[in-house]
Image (tube, rainbow, N blue to C red):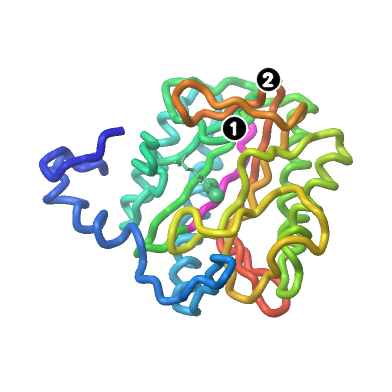
Amino acid sequence: MRKLSRNDPCWCGSGKKLKNCHLKQDLTRRRAPRKAAPRRDGITIKTDEQVAGIRASGQLTSEILDMLENRIVPGITTDQINTWVHEATVARGAVPAPLDYRGFPKSTCTSLNEIVCHGIPDSTILDDGDILNVDVTCILNGYYGDSSRMFLIGNISEDARRLVSVTKKCLDLGIAQVKAGNHFGDIGHAIQTHAESHGYSVVRAFVGHGVGIEFHEPPNVTHYGHPHTGPILEPNMVFTIEPMINAGAYQVTILEDGWTTATADGSLSAQWEHTVRVTKSGVEVLTD
Ligand code: MF3
Ligand code: CO
Ligand code: CO
């Protein structure tokens, strides 16, 4: 996507020129002031003030996903979901992080059935039996909150239902490993062990990530791995856990649009995502 110039219509849909609408916010609010210095491994420890900002943004992300729960039904398009997400985000004075991010053309990602992630909303109509991931990231006062959920369209097959619920359990087991002193490898190991015990596979090509001041920060949070490996978790590290679990093999293919990522074997894929914070005694889920 071309970068908007000052005299183009604003991305928010107000009909006003960018310079008279969201330009200032785009320039000032895409990134909050950095106050925490990166550590040697590049992972920042957030200040309490930054945590409060990310918590508020995560809360908004969660509310937007809640808003979708009753609306996503057979017969609507993924473009309609994009419009709902976009309008709800802008109405709260926030910016949809995906829009124009490295050229991504829409305000949310909608990934249907065999699409693993980064599906682009379009005129596709949701059909009875589909499973859909909607991934929402808000930038509120410069702070990022990133979360995604699965939506079941009408009556879905027992196989699809099992994949969705095992993937949710993978996320929950990953979150259960978050506490100061554990290693990132403990998270990946818990997820991989559960997914593979059900005959599923863990996508390798995409990972969770540090988040909060930027969309994607160090470290990579793999959803596979070995216990006691990787960096040690410390209080006020903030990152996502977002396992992508395939019913078949873990390999993926990126389609010609450069974004949409499908399972290589055409099998179903599911994903759930939360933004979490390490606390002294455990974890705070910031997008609950
Ligand atoms: N929200 C995705 C994530 O969980 C990133 C989407 S990037 C986009 O990291 F450009 F596709 F929006
Ligand atoms: Co993410
Ligand atoms: Co996301």
Could you tell me the amino acid type at mark 1? Leu
The image position of residue 265, as x and y in percent, is 71, 20
User: Please, is residue 281 above or below residue 89 in the view?
Assistant: below
Task: Say which element carries label 2.
Answer: loop
In this orientation, does residue 183 appear?
yes
**Dividing the picture into quarters, in which one does residue 133 lie?**
top right
Disc 1 within 8 angstroms of ligand 3 (CB): no
Identify the disc placed on residue 39.
Answer: none
Distance from disc 2 to disc 1, alpha carbons, whole Å, reads: 15 Å
Task: Say which element carries label 1.
Answer: strand
Q: Is residue 146 magenta?
A: yes
The image position of residue 206, as x and y in percent, is 61, 42
User: Along the horizontal axis of the image, is 168 left or right of 153?
Assistant: right
The image position of residue 96, as x and y in percent, is 38, 48
Residue at the image position 66 percent from the left and 26 percent from the top? 263
For mark 1, what is the residue?
132
**Closer to viewer: mark 2 or mark 1:** 2
User: Magenta stretch?
Assistant: 145-152
Q: Residue furthest front?
A: 40
Q: Earlier in the sequence, mark 2 or mark 1?
A: 1
Q: Is residue 131 magenta?
A: no
User: Along the horizontal axis of the image, is 116 left or right of 64?
Assistant: right
The C terminus: image quadrant: bottom right
Residue at the image position 72 percent from the left and 71 percent from the top? 179
The N terminus: image quadrant: top left
User: Along the horizontal axis of the image, is 140 left or right of 45?
Assistant: left
Disc 2 within 8 angstroms of ligand 1 (CB): no
Q: How many marks?
A: 2
- Mark 2: few, some, or many residues within 10 Å (few <14, many ≥20)? some
Could you tell me the amino acid type at mark 2? Gly
Query: Looking at the magenta stretch, what is its main secondary structure?
Result: strand
For mark 2, what is the residue?
266
